[in-house]
Image: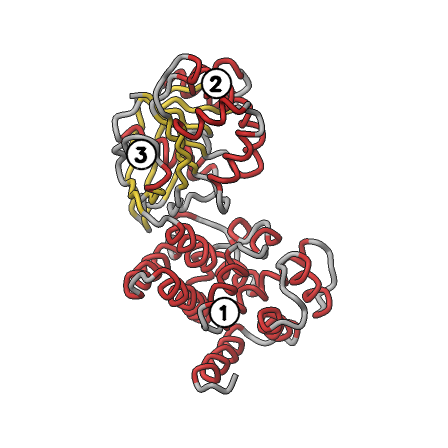
Amino acid sequence: MKAIMYGGGNIGRGFIGMLLSQSGYEVSFVDVAEAVVESLNRDHSYPVRIIDGEKCEDILVQGVSAVNGRDPEAVAEAIATADLMATAVGVNVLKFIIPNIVAGLRYRKERGLGPLNIIICENLMDANKVIEGMLKEQMNDEEKAWFDENVGLVEASIGRMVPVQTEEMKDGNPMRVCVERYGFLPVDRDGFRGEIPEIRNMVPFSPFDFYLKRKLYVHNMGHATCAYLGDLLGLEYIYEAIDREEIYVVVRLAMEESARALSKKYGVPLEDILLHVGDLLRRFTNAALKDTCARVGGDPKRKLSPSDRLIGSSLLAHEMGITPAYIAIGAAAGLRRYLAENDLAQTEENAAEVLETISGLVKDGKEAALILTFYRAILEGKTIGEMRRMADRIEADTQNGII
């Protein structure tokens, strides 16, 4: 069996490619990094180090090769003859790989080959719909009809944390990827065409929207909140931030707000989601990952967009009748970082403008007002503990019907 892994970076090598190899596939990575391509074709293997606190486990991923992404013909040929494909290139790179995928699918159609499932491992809401639209823009009507019958665009939820790889992590081998032990791959059961392949740790689930929202509104939201509160205290690493009791409490309570909202929205037992929250909080403490607040909190504009982790989780909570007071603390801290990164004055007026133009929240709405309450507290120099107590009071007032 042959699998194409489009993207030979940290997720491609450190997670998806590894699972495919362990599932019996001959994995061919597509990448534009010459050093990665040369190394994979020379050694036909690469090392992955699983780190968990002070413990580590080294795994050699074998039976792999690579195709240079700058060679469109070679990429198209590889896609045409693959049994399975996955992408992990990053949202901003997708537009550059679409022509190669279309060419590969075209070859596949012309040769009368069978269906191809493409597992999409991109941090993008509705990734299957977005990619389908991009692909069909370059197809004629006949090709579109064939596509609908033969190509499965399968969304995946990437829960494994893979930080930026330092020289220390590479430990003398530039191809080594250090990752956390968590290795489950939830995917959209309904996205497949034909038989669902057996892949190690893959969890087909329907309706998949729950898993996507759980990843974004619990995992990503909690992670971002931890990063932005770490910023407030001048901390470098995520594990340092979550180790501070005042941050830990706010992050946990924010994640629990999302958990309650998701439970009500999708009818999933709250206890199951809370167990996931507890596992995530433990994983955030993994000092060996050396994940930084700067990386996790990067691109605050996207993280403050209407359907993303901070604002999306807040809106879902409001929709489900839950006041997201603790989520609002993280959103306020994210606002502070956005203004700082864009050299804008730290004023409530600027913050309200960002919430309206970037987050889509009207200035006089309850959602914006709640976040601005905590942004104002940051400007006033209140501690994280004081903001948590403010949120406690808001929560109590809500439950008592005062607000």
| Disc on res. 19 | 3
What is the secondary structure assignment of the residue under circle 1?
helix
Apparent side of residue 120 relative to residue 198 in the rendered image (left or right): right
Q: Nearer the viewer, mark 1 or mark 3?
A: 1
Q: Residue 18 sits in which quadrant?
A: top left
Residue type at numbered disc 3: Leu
| Disc on res. 106 | 2
Q: Which of pointers 2 and 3 lies earlier in the amino acid sequence?
A: 3
Visible residue check, residue 332: yes
Residue sitting nearer the eye, 331 or 102 = 102
Q: In the rendering, at what x and y percent does residue 212 appear?
A: 41, 50
Marks 1 and 3, Cα distance to the nearest angstrom?
Answer: 38 Å
Residue sitting nearer the eye, 32 or 381 = 32
Q: Which of pointers 1 and 3 lies earlier in the amino acid sequence?
A: 3
Q: In the rendering, at what x and y percent does residue 9 appear?
A: 46, 33
Marks 1 and 2, Cα distance to the nearest angstrom?
Answer: 46 Å
Residue sitting nearer the eye, 218 or 187 = 187
User: Which residue is at 46% across, 39% downward?
Assistant: 128
